[in-house]
Image: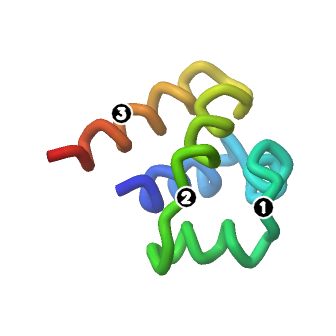
Amino acid sequence: MVNLVLRRLIDEGRTSVRAIEEVTGRGESTVYRWLAGQTLPDVEDVYRMLRELPGEGVRQELLSALLADLP
């Protein structure tokens, strides 16, 4: 679900692959693997995105997606 929310936020122009790269310190190929659902960001990456991605709505939607994935 996190990958779908990240993809939608990028498609809507509310964040970008570049912004995600900058806040997580991960490379472009890693971010694209997250977006494709091939891998998941680790806890530190998620924490950085929640703390540093601009826009309260962006952070809130990402947090909601993470919580929805919990059992």
Name the amino acid, label 3.
Answer: Ser
Q: Residues within 10 Å of mark 3 (few under 14, many from 20)?
A: few
Rounded to the nearest angstrom, the CA distance separating label 3 from label 1 is 22 Å
Within the image, what quadrant is residue 50 found in? top right
Name the amino acid, label 2.
Answer: Pro
Describe residue 37's horizontal placement relative to residue 67 as left or right. Answer: right
Within the image, what quadrant is residue 46 found in? top right
Q: Are marks 1 and 2 in contact (CB under 8 Å)?
A: yes
Q: Nearer the viewer, residue 3 or 27?
A: 27
Judge depth for marks 2 and 3 and give the one in front: 2
Disc number placed over residue 26 in the picture, else none? 1
Local secondary structure at mark 3: helix
Instruction: Locate residue 42, reporting x and y percent.
Output: 54, 55
Disc number placed over residue 49 in the picture, else none? none
Colour pattern = rainbow
Vertical placement of 33 versus 45: above or below? Answer: below
Q: Which residue is mark 3?
A: 64
